[in-house]
Image: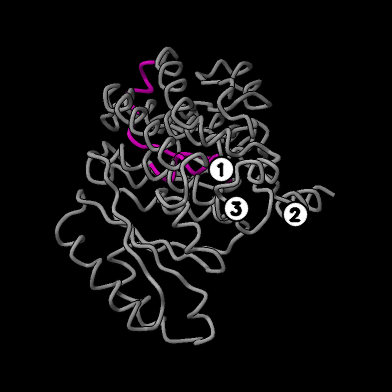
Amino acid sequence: MILDEIDKVRELDKGNILGSIRDLPEQVKQCWEEISKVKLPEDYKRTRNVVICGMGGSALGGRIVDCLFTDSLRGSIEVFTGYSVPDYVGPETLVILSSYSGNTKETLENANEARKRNACSFILASGGKLADFASKEKLPAYIYNPVHNPSAQPRMGLGYSLTAILNLMHRCGFITVDADEIEKSVDMMRSLVKEYDVLSRSSENLAKKLSERLLGKSPVLVASEHLVGSTHVFKNQLNENSKTFATNFDIPELNHHLMEGLSNPRSLKPLLHFIFFTSKLYPENIGKRYALTKEVVEKNDISAEIFELMGTSRVMQVYEMLVLSSYVSFYLAILYGINPAPIPWVDYFKNKLAE
């Protein structure tokens, strides 16, 4: 099995995606400690809603947080992936501008627009024009050195952006996440890195086994509540790392439409594989839907499986999912015999658009 042949894995992993996955716990630890020292103006703590602006991998942290605290948020939160910000953005809005490179065009336009509207803007970047903008406009910012993302791929630096947003929203009173929960999450992530790593043989490695079942398949990822944002991350990683078509749905919403869409085209059925991510933290009326939905999928001659998250809190399960999805998407790329780092079609599109 190629996944157990370390030299062959390293030969394909020319961009050191594996190094970034192994360092995900350290990204979280570094970020929480550093951003906690960034001073926040008092009016930021009195904001009434949150807008998170970012594109691609830089938006993924916001998507996770958007789903993580839906039942306990103090105020609304929205993620915007475009050139504009909502009309309601103003002095009582916390606008988090996230760009790994700091040079994302859409996010730079968001920053200028938010500034014109006197919003409480906060910059998350590793440098670039956004860092310069924060300095020029004297805006609070977390400009981090991504030493624990050796691949330099924004999607692999999610430990930074996710943790930064959690910390910032906690300090502004929108959510409650204490340092102890982050510390427990880091410890759990370190254990999972050992469990899922390439040095752990396929016979005992859940991430390797799952990637083998996805080979030649189009994954359909299903979750609920706090894990919906995590399946969006998983989908993106499968797209970019594994160069694989994937999609995600949430329960109970899919029970009202998707099940009737499983009949046709029949030629598609052998290519699909559903993964239902369950959690003991789901409400009972949600949890009981999973086995029945899986039964409906299988009665339509489509393969499916259930994967249960084991973290003891919602935050821990989100970080658990991040490690799992990173390893699975990496291993699937290796099984396809490709380097997971390059994103040639995204680069092609950007270059053509700039002409």
- Residue, disc 1: 57
Give the residue drawn at x 62%, y 52%: 334
Is residue 126 left or right of 222 when viewed as pictured? right
Label 3 sits on a secondary structure element that is helix
Which residues fall within the magenta stretch? 41-64
Label 3 crowd (10 A; few <14 / some 14-19 / many >=20): few
In depth, the one of 206 and 96 nearer the eye is 206
Quadrant, the N terminus: bottom right
Applied colour scheme: one colour
Residue that protrudes farthest toward the right in the picture: 355
**Residue type highlighted by circle 1:** Gly
Q: Which of marks 2 and 1 is nearer the N terminus?
A: 1
- Residue, disc 3: 2
Label 1 crowd (10 A; few <14 / some 14-19 / many >=20): many
Name the front one of labels 3 and 1: 3
Give the residue drawn at x 51%, y 29%: 23
Label 2 sits on a secondary structure element that is helix
Q: In which quarter of the image is residue 126?
A: top right
Label 1 sits on a secondary structure element that is helix
